[in-house]
Image: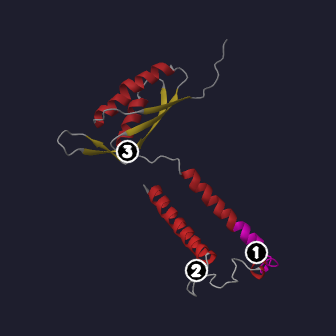
Amino acid sequence: MALRVVNRVLLALIGLALICAGGIVLARGLDWPVPSWWPYHGPGDVLLSRANRLRWRSEDWWWPAVIAALAVLMVLALWWLLAQPRRARVPDVLVDTRDGEGALVRGRALEDALVDDAETLDGVARARARLTGRRTDPVARVRLLLEPHAVPTVTLRRLTDEAVADARDAAGLRSLPTEIRLRAARHKPERVL
C-alpha cells in the first residue's frame, strides 16, 4: 500500500515538473508572449550560458559534488526500480459468511496457519508462506525446506490436499492458487562402513 502511494506521488511530481518544463520550452519555441517572471523570457535566453557552464570547473569541490549527486540519484532510481516487482502482502482476506456482510481475516493469521500446517508434514524442516493478490482472490506463495529423507512428490501432494485445502476452506474461498517452491536442506554426508 505504501509503495503504491509513494509511486503515485513521485510519478505525479515528476510528471508535473516535466509538463511545466515542456510548457516553458514550447511557449518560448513558438514565441508566445510569456510573463517576465518566467525563466527564459527574453529572445536571447538559453538554458545554460557559456559562463554558467564554465563557472564551477576550476573549483575542487565541483566534480566530486556532481558525481556524488548523480550517484545518489542512481541509487534511488535503482531502489525504486527494484521495489516495483515486489508484491504487496494481502492485509486481510474477505471471508464469505453467507449473510451478505462478510468478515475479514488477517492475512498474516492465514499465512501463519498455512505455515503451521505445512511444518507438521513429514519431511518439512521449515515453511514460509505469503499471501499476495486481492483480498477477495488471494494467491499463496509457499516455500518449503525439505529434510533429506523427504519425498518431494508426496510432500507436495499432502501440502496441496491438506494445508492449502484447509486454508482455502477456513477462509471460505472458492480457490486458493498456490505457488510452491521446494528446496532441499543441506546435510552431512553419510559414511558407509
Task: Report if the CB atoms under discs 3 and 1 are less than 8 Å apart.
Answer: no
- Residue in view at x 34 percent, y 33 percent: 167
Across and down, in percent, residue 41 comes to: 62, 84
Mark 1 or mark 2, earlier in chain:
2
Q: Residue 134 got which mark?
A: 3
Q: Which residue position holds label 1?
A: 62
Label 1's element? helix
The quadrant of the rendering that contains the N terminus is: bottom left
The quadrant of the rendering that contains the C terminus is: top right
The magenta span reads: 54-68
Q: Is residue 39 something that shows in the picture?
A: yes
In this image, 158 relative to 20: left or right? left
Q: Quadrant of residue 178?
A: top left
Mark 3 or mark 1, earlier in chain:
1
Q: Which residue position holds label 2?
A: 32
Residue kind at label 2, given as amino acid type: Trp
Look at discs 1 and 2 and give the one toward the viewer: 2
| Label 2 – label 3 distance at C-alpha | 50 Å
Across and down, in percent, residue 103 comes to: 24, 45
Look at discs 2 and 3 and give the one toward the viewer: 2
| Label 1 – label 2 distance at C-alpha | 36 Å
Residue nearest the viewer, comparing 21 with 168:
21
